[in-house]
Amino acid sequence: MTQYGAAALLALIALSVPLQIVLAFAGAPVFALTGLFTLLLAPFVLLLTTATPAVTVAPEGIMVQPRLWRTHSIPWHQVAAIKPYPLLPPADAEISRRYLAGRSRYRPAEGIMLVIPGLPAQYRIAGLLAGEGFRPVIAITNRTHAHYDVLVKKIRSFHDAAQERAGNST
């Protein structure tokens, strides 16, 4: 639902920015600023459509399956790095979530990101905001992926095995 809402918001941004520019040229200069601010929101909305897509992992690779974009099958040797995902809230910032979930059921946000240079441009926004420059990344988090711990173990195992095979073949 988040990805569809973000797509609708992106469409609204794409329609409203040109209209705001037209209004600015028509004699309402304040709309030039609102158009600029609206346009600056677009990367953050795009992040919602690409940051944590559904994935399927197998010994051959990872299949990235976002709701709005094309599915990509990525062999493990094309995953450049696995790193901690920095765009998650710290536990001390989630007071209301901890209260709603209950202290015994609350679990702090955890996540990893996979740096995958072969992904298309829309995944570069997540990389930019996560400190990877314009390198494409996806994230796996315990908030967006079922069986997070098992999934991360499989990802690390399959990636490590592919790295070992690449090291042995050279």
Image: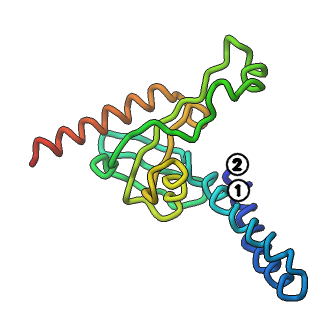
For label 2, the residue is 2
Q: Quadrant of residue 17?
A: bottom right
Q: Position of residue 24 (x, y in %)?
A: 84, 82
Residue at the far bottom in the pictured view: 26
Left or right side of 14 for 152: left
At label 2, counting other C-alpha atoms closer than 10 Å, the crowd grade (few under 14, some 14-19, many 20 or more) is few
Q: Look at label 1 and name its amino acid.
A: Ala
Helix, strand or loop at label 2? It is helix
Q: Is residue 136 above or below residue 95?
A: below
Left or right side of 136 for 1: right
The residue located at (11%, 41%) in the rendering is 168
Q: Is residue 80 above or below residue 149?
A: below
The residue located at (45%, 36%) in the rendering is 84
Q: Quadrant of residue 59?
A: top left
The residue located at (84%, 75%) in the rendering is 31
The front one of 133 and 54 is 133
**Gap in Å between the C-alphas at discs 2 and 1?**
6 Å
Q: Look at label 2 and name its amino acid.
A: Thr
Across the whole image, how many numbered discs are drawn on residues? 2
Helix, strand or loop at label 1? It is helix
Q: Position of residue 75 (x, y in %)?
A: 31, 50
The front one of 160 and 41 is 41
Q: Which mark is residue 74?
A: none
Q: Position of residue 54 (x, y in %)?
A: 53, 45
At label 1, counting other C-alpha atoms closer than 10 Å, the crowd grade (few under 14, some 14-19, many 20 or more) is some
The front one of 131 and 49 is 131
Left or right side of 160 for 6: right
The residue located at (77%, 19%) in the rendering is 99
For label 1, the residue is 6
Q: Is residue 73 above or below residue 163?
A: below
Q: Position of residue 166 (x, y in %)?
A: 17, 45
Verify CB contact (< 8 Å) between mark 2 and mark 1: yes
